[in-house]
Amino acid sequence: MKTPRPPWLIVAAVLAVHLLLGREVQRIHDGWVSESPPTTPARMQVEFVQEMALQTPPAARPVPPPPPAPRPVASPATTAASAPQEPASAPEPAPEPAPAPERVVEAAPAELAAPAASAAPSDEPGPEWPLSTRLSYELTGNYRGPVTGQAQVEWLRKGRDYQIHLDVGVGPSFAPLITRRISSHGRLTPGGISPQRYDEETKLIFGEPRRLNLTFLGGEQWAPGGRGAPQDAVSQFVQLTWLALTGRETLEAGRVIQLPLQLPSGPYDWQYEVVGEEVLNTPMGPLAAWHLRPRQPARGNDLAAEVWLAPSLQYLPVRLVIRQDAGTYIDLMLKSAPLQAAPESTDGIPRRLSQ
Protein backbone atom coordinates (compact mmCIF):
# COMPACT_ATOMS: atom_id res chain seq x y z
CA MET A 1 0.00 0.00 0.00
CA LYS A 2 1.26 3.42 -0.88
CA THR A 3 2.17 5.62 2.11
CA PRO A 4 0.07 8.81 2.06
CA ARG A 5 1.98 12.05 1.76
CA PRO A 6 2.15 14.21 4.90
CA PRO A 7 -0.63 16.82 4.86
CA TRP A 8 1.80 19.64 5.56
CA LEU A 9 3.71 18.86 2.37
CA ILE A 10 0.51 18.96 0.32
CA VAL A 11 -0.46 22.27 1.94
CA ALA A 12 2.99 23.71 1.25
CA ALA A 13 2.89 22.73 -2.41
CA VAL A 14 -0.61 24.11 -2.94
CA LEU A 15 0.31 27.30 -1.06
CA ALA A 16 3.30 27.76 -3.32
CA VAL A 17 1.15 27.49 -6.42
CA HIS A 18 -1.83 29.53 -5.30
CA LEU A 19 -0.47 32.04 -2.79
CA LEU A 20 3.19 32.76 -3.34
CA LEU A 21 4.00 31.67 -6.86
CA GLY A 22 1.19 33.52 -8.64
CA ARG A 23 1.57 33.49 -12.37
CA GLU A 24 4.60 31.49 -13.40
CA VAL A 25 5.06 33.28 -16.66
CA GLN A 26 3.46 36.74 -16.66
CA ARG A 27 4.38 38.54 -19.86
CA ILE A 28 3.10 42.05 -19.31
CA HIS A 29 2.57 44.16 -22.42
CA ASP A 30 3.05 47.91 -22.79
CA GLY A 31 6.75 47.70 -22.00
CA TRP A 32 6.44 46.79 -18.31
CA VAL A 33 8.12 43.38 -18.46
CA SER A 34 11.46 42.67 -20.04
CA GLU A 35 11.63 39.40 -21.98
CA SER A 36 15.35 39.15 -21.23
CA PRO A 37 15.78 41.14 -18.02
CA PRO A 38 19.24 42.47 -17.25
CA THR A 39 21.20 41.05 -14.38
CA THR A 40 19.65 41.79 -11.01
CA PRO A 41 21.44 44.77 -9.40
CA ALA A 42 23.86 43.89 -6.62
CA ARG A 43 22.40 44.17 -3.15
CA MET A 44 23.54 47.23 -1.21
CA GLN A 45 25.74 46.35 1.73
CA VAL A 46 24.66 48.06 4.95
CA GLU A 47 25.68 47.33 8.54
CA PHE A 48 22.81 47.52 11.03
CA VAL A 49 24.30 48.62 14.33
CA GLN A 50 21.49 49.87 16.57
CA GLU A 51 17.97 49.03 17.64
CA MET A 52 15.37 51.61 16.79
CA ALA A 53 13.87 53.19 19.90
CA LEU A 54 10.30 54.40 20.19
CA GLN A 55 9.99 58.09 19.36
CA THR A 56 7.50 60.86 19.75
CA PRO A 57 5.72 61.08 16.40
CA PRO A 58 7.30 63.87 14.35
CA ALA A 59 5.23 66.95 13.77
CA ALA A 60 3.88 67.32 10.27
CA ARG A 61 6.01 69.51 8.08
CA PRO A 62 4.32 72.94 7.83
CA VAL A 63 3.11 73.90 4.41
CA PRO A 64 4.76 77.20 3.41
CA PRO A 65 2.27 80.06 2.93
CA PRO A 66 1.75 81.36 -0.60
CA PRO A 67 3.96 84.31 -1.54
CA PRO A 68 2.33 87.72 -1.01
CA ALA A 69 0.65 89.24 -4.02
CA PRO A 70 2.80 91.93 -5.67
CA ARG A 71 1.79 95.46 -4.77
CA PRO A 72 0.49 97.50 -7.74
CA VAL A 73 2.91 100.14 -8.95
CA ALA A 74 1.30 103.38 -10.11
CA SER A 75 2.40 104.73 -13.46
CA PRO A 76 3.94 108.26 -13.58
CA ALA A 77 0.85 109.55 -15.37
CA THR A 78 -1.44 108.18 -12.68
CA THR A 79 0.78 109.59 -9.92
CA ALA A 80 0.84 112.99 -11.52
CA ALA A 81 -2.90 112.99 -12.01
CA SER A 82 -3.61 112.00 -8.41
CA ALA A 83 -1.12 114.42 -6.82
CA PRO A 84 -2.59 117.69 -5.44
CA GLN A 85 -2.11 120.62 -7.79
CA GLU A 86 0.10 123.44 -6.50
CA PRO A 87 -0.44 127.01 -7.69
CA ALA A 88 1.77 127.96 -10.59
CA SER A 89 4.87 129.98 -9.73
CA ALA A 90 7.93 131.18 -11.51
CA PRO A 91 10.59 128.49 -11.81
CA GLU A 92 13.66 128.90 -9.62
CA PRO A 93 17.05 128.91 -11.27
CA ALA A 94 18.64 125.45 -11.21
CA PRO A 95 21.80 125.20 -9.06
CA GLU A 96 25.07 124.44 -10.75
CA PRO A 97 25.99 120.74 -10.50
CA ALA A 98 28.70 119.87 -7.98
CA PRO A 99 31.86 118.32 -9.40
CA ALA A 100 31.78 114.51 -9.31
CA PRO A 101 34.19 112.94 -6.80
CA GLU A 102 37.23 111.21 -8.19
CA ARG A 103 36.49 107.48 -8.68
CA VAL A 104 39.13 104.83 -8.19
CA VAL A 105 38.48 101.45 -9.87
CA GLU A 106 40.39 98.39 -8.72
CA ALA A 107 40.62 95.19 -10.75
CA ALA A 108 38.53 92.46 -9.12
CA PRO A 109 39.78 88.87 -8.94
CA ALA A 110 38.33 86.67 -11.65
CA GLU A 111 36.43 84.53 -9.17
CA LEU A 112 34.74 87.59 -7.69
CA ALA A 113 34.10 89.37 -10.95
CA ALA A 114 32.33 86.39 -12.51
CA PRO A 115 28.73 85.77 -11.47
CA ALA A 116 28.40 83.15 -8.75
CA ALA A 117 27.66 79.75 -10.20
CA SER A 118 24.74 77.89 -8.67
CA ALA A 119 25.78 75.13 -6.31
CA ALA A 120 25.52 71.62 -7.69
CA PRO A 121 22.50 69.79 -6.26
CA SER A 122 23.34 67.41 -3.45
CA ASP A 123 22.93 63.69 -4.07
CA GLU A 124 21.64 63.19 -0.54
CA PRO A 125 17.90 62.44 -0.39
CA GLY A 126 17.11 64.55 2.66
CA PRO A 127 16.44 63.91 6.36
CA GLU A 128 12.81 62.90 5.82
CA TRP A 129 13.88 59.46 4.57
CA PRO A 130 14.48 56.82 7.26
CA LEU A 131 17.96 55.41 7.66
CA SER A 132 18.57 51.99 6.18
CA THR A 133 16.33 49.72 8.27
CA ARG A 134 15.69 46.01 8.78
CA LEU A 135 12.32 44.77 10.07
CA SER A 136 11.77 41.14 11.09
CA TYR A 137 8.31 39.57 11.22
CA GLU A 138 6.61 36.41 12.46
CA LEU A 139 4.54 34.84 9.70
CA THR A 140 1.22 33.12 10.28
CA GLY A 141 -1.52 32.47 7.80
CA ASN A 142 -4.02 30.09 6.35
CA TYR A 143 -4.54 27.98 3.27
CA ARG A 144 -6.85 25.07 4.02
CA GLY A 145 -5.10 25.03 7.36
CA PRO A 146 -2.58 27.10 9.33
CA VAL A 147 0.87 27.94 8.00
CA THR A 148 3.82 29.53 9.82
CA GLY A 149 7.17 31.00 8.91
CA GLN A 150 9.22 34.18 9.02
CA ALA A 151 9.77 37.29 6.93
CA GLN A 152 12.21 40.17 6.74
CA VAL A 153 12.10 43.56 5.05
CA GLU A 154 15.22 45.61 4.37
CA TRP A 155 14.99 49.23 3.31
CA LEU A 156 18.41 50.23 1.95
CA ARG A 157 19.55 53.53 0.50
CA LYS A 158 22.72 55.14 -0.78
CA GLY A 159 22.42 58.74 -1.87
CA ARG A 160 19.28 58.93 -3.99
CA ASP A 161 19.33 55.24 -4.87
CA TYR A 162 17.22 52.82 -2.86
CA GLN A 163 16.49 49.10 -2.62
CA ILE A 164 13.69 47.27 -0.80
CA HIS A 165 13.93 43.51 -0.22
CA LEU A 166 11.14 41.36 1.19
CA ASP A 167 12.25 37.81 2.05
CA VAL A 168 9.55 35.31 3.02
CA GLY A 169 10.05 31.74 4.23
CA VAL A 170 7.20 29.27 4.84
CA GLY A 171 8.15 26.46 7.18
CA PRO A 172 11.03 26.15 9.68
CA SER A 173 13.72 28.82 9.38
CA PHE A 174 16.53 26.23 9.06
CA ALA A 175 14.83 24.47 6.10
CA PRO A 176 11.91 26.50 4.67
CA LEU A 177 9.60 24.66 2.30
CA ILE A 178 8.99 27.76 0.22
CA THR A 179 11.03 30.94 -0.07
CA ARG A 180 10.16 34.08 -1.91
CA ARG A 181 12.16 37.26 -2.45
CA ILE A 182 10.61 40.44 -3.79
CA SER A 183 12.89 43.37 -4.58
CA SER A 184 12.37 46.94 -5.74
CA HIS A 185 15.13 49.19 -7.09
CA GLY A 186 14.87 52.86 -8.00
CA ARG A 187 15.42 56.49 -7.06
CA LEU A 188 14.21 58.92 -4.41
CA THR A 189 12.63 62.01 -5.95
CA PRO A 190 10.80 65.12 -4.68
CA GLY A 191 7.58 63.17 -5.34
CA GLY A 192 8.73 60.18 -3.32
CA ILE A 193 9.84 56.75 -4.47
CA SER A 194 10.24 56.18 -8.20
CA PRO A 195 10.72 52.45 -8.90
CA GLN A 196 12.78 51.49 -11.91
CA ARG A 197 12.83 47.71 -11.56
CA TYR A 198 10.84 45.04 -9.71
CA ASP A 199 11.92 41.40 -9.25
CA GLU A 200 10.28 38.30 -7.80
CA GLU A 201 11.93 34.96 -7.16
CA THR A 202 10.00 32.00 -5.77
CA LYS A 203 11.61 28.68 -4.89
CA LEU A 204 10.22 25.41 -3.55
CA ILE A 205 12.36 23.10 -1.45
CA PHE A 206 12.62 20.98 -4.60
CA GLY A 207 12.77 22.62 -8.00
CA GLU A 208 14.25 25.51 -9.88
CA PRO A 209 13.53 29.14 -8.93
CA ARG A 210 10.73 30.90 -10.81
CA ARG A 211 11.37 34.55 -11.62
CA LEU A 212 9.39 37.60 -12.73
CA ASN A 213 10.81 40.99 -13.71
CA LEU A 214 9.03 44.30 -14.29
CA THR A 215 10.87 47.27 -15.77
CA PHE A 216 9.28 50.66 -15.20
CA LEU A 217 9.41 52.99 -18.20
CA GLY A 218 8.70 56.67 -17.73
CA GLY A 219 6.85 55.94 -14.51
CA GLU A 220 6.85 59.48 -13.16
CA GLN A 221 4.63 60.64 -16.05
CA TRP A 222 2.16 57.79 -15.63
CA ALA A 223 0.57 58.82 -12.33
CA PRO A 224 -2.68 60.80 -12.67
CA GLY A 225 -3.18 63.93 -10.63
CA GLY A 226 0.50 64.46 -9.91
CA ARG A 227 0.54 61.87 -7.10
CA GLY A 228 4.04 60.63 -7.82
CA ALA A 229 5.35 57.63 -9.70
CA PRO A 230 3.44 54.33 -9.79
CA GLN A 231 4.53 52.00 -7.00
CA ASP A 232 5.21 48.29 -7.11
CA ALA A 233 4.09 45.59 -4.67
CA VAL A 234 6.68 46.46 -1.99
CA SER A 235 7.65 50.09 -2.64
CA GLN A 236 4.05 51.16 -1.94
CA PHE A 237 4.51 50.59 1.79
CA VAL A 238 7.61 52.78 2.02
CA GLN A 239 5.82 55.42 -0.08
CA LEU A 240 2.96 55.37 2.44
CA THR A 241 5.51 55.72 5.26
CA TRP A 242 7.08 58.73 3.55
CA LEU A 243 3.73 60.39 2.83
CA ALA A 244 2.70 60.09 6.50
CA LEU A 245 6.12 60.97 7.92
CA THR A 246 6.34 64.21 5.94
CA GLY A 247 2.72 65.22 6.48
CA ARG A 248 1.87 64.98 2.79
CA GLU A 249 -0.97 62.68 3.82
CA THR A 250 -2.91 63.07 7.06
CA LEU A 251 -3.89 59.82 8.74
CA GLU A 252 -7.37 60.09 10.18
CA ALA A 253 -10.30 57.69 10.22
CA GLY A 254 -12.30 57.76 7.00
CA ARG A 255 -9.62 59.42 4.89
CA VAL A 256 -8.82 57.86 1.51
CA ILE A 257 -5.26 57.83 0.15
CA GLN A 258 -4.91 57.41 -3.60
CA LEU A 259 -1.82 55.64 -4.85
CA PRO A 260 -0.89 54.69 -8.42
CA LEU A 261 0.10 51.03 -8.31
CA GLN A 262 1.66 48.68 -10.87
CA LEU A 263 1.13 44.97 -10.20
CA PRO A 264 1.81 42.01 -12.52
CA SER A 265 -1.67 42.12 -14.09
CA GLY A 266 -1.40 45.82 -14.92
CA PRO A 267 -1.82 49.33 -13.46
CA TYR A 268 -4.26 50.32 -10.73
CA ASP A 269 -5.51 53.65 -9.48
CA TRP A 270 -5.31 52.19 -5.97
CA GLN A 271 -7.12 53.54 -2.93
CA TYR A 272 -6.37 52.91 0.74
CA GLU A 273 -8.97 53.75 3.36
CA VAL A 274 -7.75 54.78 6.80
CA VAL A 275 -9.79 52.55 9.14
CA GLY A 276 -8.54 54.15 12.34
CA GLU A 277 -5.83 53.96 14.98
CA GLU A 278 -5.47 50.60 16.73
CA VAL A 279 -3.19 49.31 19.50
CA LEU A 280 -1.09 46.26 18.61
CA ASN A 281 0.69 44.05 21.13
CA THR A 282 4.31 43.72 20.03
CA PRO A 283 7.62 42.67 21.65
CA MET A 284 8.28 46.41 22.05
CA GLY A 285 5.07 46.74 24.06
CA PRO A 286 1.68 48.10 22.98
CA LEU A 287 2.05 50.19 19.84
CA ALA A 288 -0.53 52.56 18.38
CA ALA A 289 -0.72 52.09 14.61
CA TRP A 290 -2.89 53.43 11.82
CA HIS A 291 -4.76 50.67 9.99
CA LEU A 292 -5.06 51.12 6.20
CA ARG A 293 -6.98 48.71 3.98
CA PRO A 294 -7.71 48.60 0.24
CA ARG A 295 -11.06 49.85 -0.97
CA GLN A 296 -11.16 47.53 -3.98
CA PRO A 297 -10.20 43.92 -4.73
CA ALA A 298 -7.17 43.04 -6.80
CA ARG A 299 -7.48 41.36 -10.20
CA GLY A 300 -6.56 37.79 -11.08
CA ASN A 301 -3.63 36.49 -9.04
CA ASP A 302 -2.60 39.92 -7.74
CA LEU A 303 -2.58 40.13 -3.96
CA ALA A 304 -4.05 42.93 -1.84
CA ALA A 305 -2.52 44.00 1.47
CA GLU A 306 -3.63 45.74 4.64
CA VAL A 307 -0.97 47.66 6.54
CA TRP A 308 -0.54 49.11 10.04
CA LEU A 309 1.81 52.14 10.27
CA ALA A 310 3.24 53.04 13.70
CA PRO A 311 3.88 56.78 14.26
CA SER A 312 6.34 56.03 17.11
CA LEU A 313 8.46 53.97 14.69
CA GLN A 314 8.66 56.58 11.90
CA TYR A 315 5.37 55.26 10.46
CA LEU A 316 7.05 52.00 9.46
CA PRO A 317 4.75 49.00 8.83
CA VAL A 318 4.54 46.92 12.03
CA ARG A 319 1.94 44.57 10.58
CA LEU A 320 0.99 43.44 7.06
CA VAL A 321 -1.86 41.12 6.08
CA ILE A 322 -1.57 39.96 2.47
CA ARG A 323 -4.69 38.29 1.07
CA GLN A 324 -5.59 36.31 -2.02
CA ASP A 325 -9.14 35.72 -0.80
CA ALA A 326 -11.04 35.47 2.48
CA GLY A 327 -9.50 32.08 3.35
CA THR A 328 -6.02 32.50 1.89
CA TYR A 329 -3.69 34.99 3.52
CA ILE A 330 -0.42 35.53 5.35
CA ASP A 331 -0.11 37.78 8.40
CA LEU A 332 3.28 39.42 9.11
CA MET A 333 3.67 40.79 12.66
CA LEU A 334 6.75 42.64 13.93
CA LYS A 335 8.69 40.29 16.19
CA SER A 336 11.52 42.56 17.45
CA ALA A 337 12.72 46.14 17.44
CA PRO A 338 13.75 47.31 13.96
CA LEU A 339 17.49 47.60 13.32
CA GLN A 340 18.99 50.66 11.66
CA ALA A 341 22.28 51.88 10.28
CA ALA A 342 24.29 54.44 12.23
CA PRO A 343 23.02 58.04 11.94
CA GLU A 344 26.11 59.09 9.97
CA SER A 345 25.46 56.29 7.47
CA THR A 346 22.86 58.18 5.46
CA ASP A 347 24.78 57.40 2.27
CA GLY A 348 24.41 53.68 2.88
CA ILE A 349 28.13 53.14 3.52
CA PRO A 350 28.57 50.83 6.55
CA ARG A 351 30.03 52.62 9.56
CA ARG A 352 30.23 51.69 13.23
CA LEU A 353 29.07 53.86 16.07
CA SER A 354 31.95 55.43 17.95
CA GLN A 355 32.69 53.69 21.23
Image: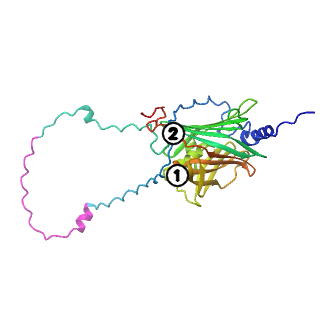
For the N terminus, give its image quadrant: top right
User: Which of the 4 quarters of the picture holds residue 221?
Assistant: top right
Tell me the tag on residue 340. Answer: 2
The Cα atoms of the two marked residues, 2 and 1, are separated by: 17 Å
Question: Which residue is painted at 6% across and 59% down in the image?
Answer: 93
Task: Check disc 1 and report the residue beneath it.
Answer: 311
The number of numbered discs placed on residues in the rendered structure image is 2
- Which residue type carries mark 2? Gln
Percent coordinates x, y for residue 285 in the rendering: 56, 50
The magenta region covers 76-102
* Depth check, front residue: 41 or 50: 50
User: Which of the 4 quarters of the picture holds residue 9?
Assistant: top right
Tell me the tag on residue 319. Answer: none
- The answer to whether residue 214 shows anywhere in this view is no
Percent coordinates x, y for residue 301 in the rendering: 73, 45
Q: Is residue 346 left or right of residue 19?
A: left
- Which residue type carries mark 1? Pro
* Depth check, front residue: 352 or 40: 352
Q: Is residue 264 left or right of residue 125?
A: right
Q: Is residue 83 magenta?
A: yes
